[in-house]
């Protein structure tokens, strides 16, 4: 089956200058990339002693998504993050190689309880950051988030991958 959108873009591109063609191709690839990313945004809630905090998280499920993580990003907005779905409870080890934004890493058990928080990780570091116990998920948010919102070990996380929801 022929992709008509691709043929229209290709026909349009052939009538443009080389520079304009490259710009058009880059715009199409960026739009496709953003559309693919948008489908993986989900909500996650953390219940603290002070109330419920809601985050919009990008899902990192595949080995490629988990390997990439938040590398090369220059900023991460408050209320946003990335949730790594480990598939099953197991020990988790992370590092900050090629990650420019300091993060809080929140290690979450399968029942949705927070096991451990690594506060204010060091950007670009290859030091290992370990969960300490088997976890089902790891939530990465901008550094300072856990302290700012009173998120602590034992708090509950609500998301479809955790059984305690």
Image (tube, rainbow, N blue to C red):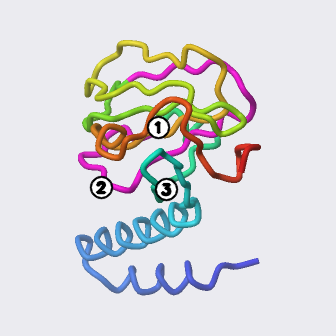
Q: Is residue 2 magenta?
A: no
At 38% from the left edge and 70% from the top edge, which residue is drawn?
25
At 63% from the left edge and 43% from the top edge, which residue is drawn?
61
Write down the residue under mark 2: 77
- Within the image, what quadrant is residue 126 found in? top left
Write down the residue under mark 1: 68
What whole-number distance in Å separates the C-alpha atoms at marks 2 and 3?
A: 18 Å
Q: Is residue 141 left or right of residue 85?
A: left
Please rate how many residues cluster around mark 2, counting C-alpha atoms within 10 Å: few if below 14, some from 14 to 19, many from 20: few
Q: Quadrant of the N terminus?
A: bottom right
Question: Residue 52, which numbered label?
Answer: 3
In the displayed structure, 45 sits above or below 133; it is: below
Element class at badge 3: strand
Point out the frontmost of discs 2 and 1.
2
Q: Nearer the viewer, residue 102 or 157?
A: 157
Whichever of callouts 1 and 3 sits on the residue coming sooner in the sequence is 3
CB contact under 8 Å: marks 1 and 3: no
Element class at badge 2: loop
Whichever of callouts 2 and 3 sits on the residue coming sooner in the sequence is 3
* Residue stretch rendered in magenta on the structure: 69-95
Q: In x, y percent, where is residue 128?
A: 42, 13
């Amino acid at each position: 089956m022929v992709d008509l959108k691709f043929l229209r873009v290709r026909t349009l591109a052939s009538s443009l200058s080389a520079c304009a063609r490259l710009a058009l191709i880059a715009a199409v690839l960026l739009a496709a990339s953003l559309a693919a990313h948008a489908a993986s945004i989900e909500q996650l809630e953390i219940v603290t002693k002070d109330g419920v905090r809601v985050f919009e998280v990008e899902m990192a499920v595949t080995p490629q998504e988990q390997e990439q993580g938040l590398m090369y990003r220059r900023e991460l907005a408050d209320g946003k993050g990335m949730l790594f779905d480990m598939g099953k409870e197991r020990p988790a080890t992370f590092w900050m190689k090629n990650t420019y934004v300091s993060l809080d890493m929140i290690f979450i058990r399968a029942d949705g309880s927070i096991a451990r928080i690594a506060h204010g990780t060091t950007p670009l570091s290859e030091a290992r950051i370990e969960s300490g116990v088997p976890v089902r998920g790891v939530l990465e948010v901008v550094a300072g988030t856990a302290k700012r919102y009173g998120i602590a070990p034992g708090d509950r996380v609500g998301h479809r991958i955790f059984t305690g929801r």
